[in-house]
Image: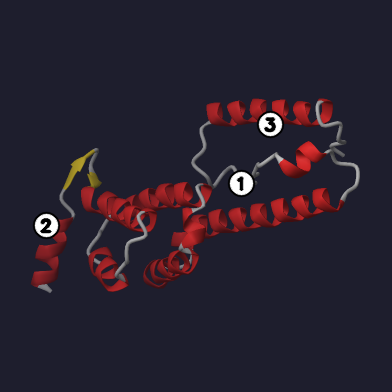
Amino acid sequence: NQLYNAISSFINITTVNNKSILAIHLAQYIHICFKDKMQISFDDINHIFKYIRDKDVFEYSYRKYFGMRLLNGLALINESTELELLKEFKKQCGAIYINKCETMYNDIQKSRKFIFEHLDNINNSSNTSSLVNNTMNYSVNILTFSIWDIKRSDTIKHSLLFSSVLYFLKCRCKISCT
C-alpha cells in the first residue's frame, strides 16, 4: 500500500494548469500508437491507468484524440482495438466514464451507414448526372453537438460550406435535394 501511494504520488505530479501530466501524455501515447499503427499493450496501459488520479483529465484528453481518430478514419482501421480499450476503461471506471466516447463512435457508425445508403440511392437513380456518379467524392458526419468538442465558429464555417455544396449540387448538377 505504501509503494502504491508513493508511485501514485510521483506519477500524479501536476504542473500544467494543475492537471496531471501523465493523464495527458498517456492519452497522447495511445493516439500516436493508433495513428502510427503501433502495437498497444493493454497490460501496460492498464498498469499506468490505475495509478492516475485525474481520470477525468485523461478522459477529456483521450476523448479529444479519439474524436480526431474517428473523424480521420483512423479509429475505423483499428476498430476492434479501440473498442477493446474502451471496454477496459468501462470495466475500471464504469459505463458513465466512457459514455461520450461510445456516443461519438455511434455517431460515426450512423454517419457511415447514412453515406453508404445515400451513395446506393445515387448509384441506383437514373436522374443523377454523371458528374455526381463518377467524380464527386464526399463524406458527411452527423455528430451529437453536445458530445463533440466543437467550437461555435467551426459550426458556422461548416454550415456555410454545406450551404455552398447544396447550391452547387442544385444548380450545377441539376439534382433535387428533397
Q: Secondary structure at mark 2?
A: helix
Judge depth for marks 1 and 3 and give the one in front: 3
Judge depth for marks 2 and 3 and give the one in front: 3
| Amino acid identity at mark 3 | Phe
Residue at label 3?
162
Left-right relation of 114 to 172: left
| Amino acid identity at mark 2 | Phe
Q: Identify whether 135 is placed above or below 115.
A: above
**Viewer-proximal residue among 153 and 146:** 153
**Viewer-proximal residue among 161 and 55:** 161
Label 2 Cα crowd, 10 Å radius (few <14 / some 14-19 / many 20+)? few
Residue 175 is situated, as x and y percent measured from the top left of the image, at 86, 35
Q: Which mark is residue 143?
A: 1
Q: Identify whether 75 is placed above or below 92.
A: above
- Quarter of the rendering occupied by the C terminus: top right
The first of marks 2 and 3 along the sequence is 2
Residue at label 2?
10
Residue 163 is situated, as x and y percent measured from the top left of the image, at 72, 27
Label 3 Cα crowd, 10 Å radius (few <14 / some 14-19 / many 20+)? few
Residue 37 is situated, as x and y percent measured from the top left of the image, at 37, 60
